[in-house]
């Protein structure tokens, strides 16, 4: 039975809330943690907060005094959380698609438990995605923490910046999925979310004031740009263990990105599963519209209503809120923060590879990265591996307003694209066939991307 044939009304009315006993235990543990760390963070620099009265500056980032991402929880996580080598972590800056990536990941790794004939009982249809996959920051509050179990791989989410993660995660080289979002949409989403949860005595946070704070980097787990570049740089150094995604790309081509995510998680879809439409079924079940309907009622921890996590979920909603001047200010900050990594104008190419002796039937797509030391390397998107430095790689082919394919040719004046000495030239006749088989994903920034070009070629 397809999820799309199930009554939304019955789904939303069946959403379960966290066990009251567990909530009381967590409240008690939260009090203990607060008492243990309050002297440490009381002396730290502080600024006016968003949902809470203050934000505290710790290891270069700002944290509130309460909620899951409180400064006390972050400190306690660093002191007590113990990773396992096979763990997987879903990392995001707040309001960057955390709920969505949690839902997709949970659905991918648990799909054998919920086949089509039992989708109506899927945990995502009766629980908030945040209850399905725990945060590192909340694990230290549990009476019997999930991280004490032997299940492997364990999957956690976190808002903690890369440089402040518990050391065992870094030491073990755990896999990390990082998803970021256009800072403009992050700001707008954070503003609305804040005023749903803001302490009543603090009053309504004005849009202009929130904008100034965001631009100055004074946001929960901010500065937002530093949070993104911290994981991005780590991904350049460790491409096989850090998968870097963007909310915009996931929205544009969810199906192919889910296939790629499943491969990275170690739960690849079989050809039979793809043919049966199981990828599309997960995409539909985890769509913003469906999750929003399911979570109309009920509360998450700390009294946060489930519906607070679902407002618009649209790419480019910032156009409805920011003035031209505000947009230009954020564009300039983004450019300054991201240009050092060449995140502003990434380069693309498609390199055909032989398939059982047939030429030019499968596409690999490579991205060009500039490292802090000035060197450039190319990474295969699908497999996350960098080409060898001696490949003499020239990425001349870009996705811009047109899409062309490449084929082999014996022209010494054309750029060499691989370490075998193979030479490639453009071949328009193959464009349609090859681009249909190419996974398309853009890097940053987000405003440079025109969806119409991609829509036209796929």
Image (tube, rainbow, N blue to C red):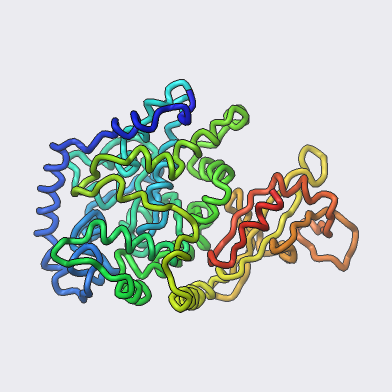
- Horizontal arrangement in the rendering, residue 343 relative to residue 410 (left or right): left
Question: Looking at the picture, does residue 307 appear above or below residue 373?
Answer: above
Question: Looking at the picture, does residue 385 appear above or below residue 374?
Answer: above
Considering every residue shown, the one lying at the far top of the view is 117
From the viewer's side, name the closer residue of 261 and 317: 317
Q: Which of the 4 image quarters holds residue 79?
A: bottom left
Q: Position of residue 414 (x, y in %)?
A: 84, 65
Q: Residue at x 29, y 34 (%)?
A: 15
- Horizontal arrangement in the rendering, residue 179 relative to residue 190 (left or right): right
Q: Residue at x 33, y 39 (%)?
A: 132
Q: Residue at x 59, y 59 (%)?
A: 442
From the viewer's side, name the closer residue of 53 and 264: 53
Question: Looking at the picture, does residue 5 appear above or below residue 381?
Answer: above
Q: Position of residue 305 (x, y in %)?
A: 25, 47
Q: Residue at x 35, y 37 (%)?
A: 294
From the viewer's side, name the closer residue of 191 and 63: 191
Q: Position of residue 391 (x, y in %)?
A: 72, 62
- Horizontal arrangement in the rendering, residue 128 relative to residue 144 (left or right): right
Q: Position of residue 230 (x, y in %)?
A: 42, 66
Considering every residue shown, the one lying at the far right of the view is 410
- Horizontal arrangement in the rendering, residue 290 relative to residue 273 (left or right): left
Q: Could one spot residue 60 in this view of the protein?
A: no
């Amino acid at each position: 039975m397809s999820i799309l044939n199930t009554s939304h009304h019955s789904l939303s009315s069946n959403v379960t809330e966290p066990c009251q006993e567990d909530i009381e235990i967590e409240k008690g543990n939260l009090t203990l943690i607060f008492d243990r760390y309050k002297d440490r963070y009381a002396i730290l620099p502080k600024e006016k907060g968003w949902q809470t009265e203050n934000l505290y500056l710790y290891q270069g980032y700002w944290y509130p005094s309460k909620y899951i991402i409180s400064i006390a929880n972050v400190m306690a996580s660093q002191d007590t959380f113990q990773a396992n080598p096979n763990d997987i972590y879903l990392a995001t800056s707040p309001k960057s698609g955390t709920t969505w990536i949690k839902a997709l990941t949970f659905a991918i790794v648990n799909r054998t438990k919920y086949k089509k004939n039992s989708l109506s009982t899927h945990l995502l249809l009766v629980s908030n995605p945040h209850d399905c996959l725990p945060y590192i920051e909340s694990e230290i509050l549990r009476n019997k923490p999930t991280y004490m179990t032997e299940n492997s791989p364990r999957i956690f989410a976190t808002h903690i910046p890369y440089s402040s993660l518990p050391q065992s995660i870094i030491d073990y080289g755990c896999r990390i999925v990082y998803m970021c979002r256009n800072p403009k949409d992050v700001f707008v989403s954070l503003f609305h979310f804040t005023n749903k949860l803001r302490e009543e005595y603090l009053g309504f946070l004005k849009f202009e004031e929130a904008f100034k704070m965001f631009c100055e980097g004074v946001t929960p787990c901010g500065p937002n740009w530093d949070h993104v570049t911290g994981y991005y740089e780590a991904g350049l150094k460790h491409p096989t263990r850090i998968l870097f995604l963007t909310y915009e790309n996931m929205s544009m081509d969810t199906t192919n990105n889910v296939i790629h995510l499943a491969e990275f998680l170690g739960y690849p879809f079989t050809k039979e599963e793809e043919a049966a439409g199981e990828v599309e079924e997960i995409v539909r079940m985890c769509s913003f519209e469906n999750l929003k309907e399911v979570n109309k009622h009920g509360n998450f921890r700390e009294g946060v209503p489930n519906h607070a996590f679902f407002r618009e979920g649209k790419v480019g909603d910032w156009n409805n809120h920011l003035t031209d001047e505000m947009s230009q200010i954020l564009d300039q900050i983004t450019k300054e923060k991201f240009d050092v990594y060449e995140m502003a104008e990434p380069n693309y190419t498609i390199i055909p590879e032989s398939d059982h002796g047939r030429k030019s039937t499968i596409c690999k797509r490579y991205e060009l990265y500039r490292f802090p030391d000035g060197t450039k390397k190319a990474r295969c998107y699908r497999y996350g591996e960098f080409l060898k430095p001696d490949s003499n790689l020239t990425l001349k082919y870009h996705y811009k307003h047109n899409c062309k394919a490449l084929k082999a040719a014996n022209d010494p004046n054309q750029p060499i694209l691989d370490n075998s000495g193979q030479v490639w030239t453009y071949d328009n006749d193959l464009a349609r066939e090859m681009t249909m088989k190419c996974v398309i994903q853009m890097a940053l920034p987000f405003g440079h991307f025109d969806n119409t070009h991609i829509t036209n070629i796929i």
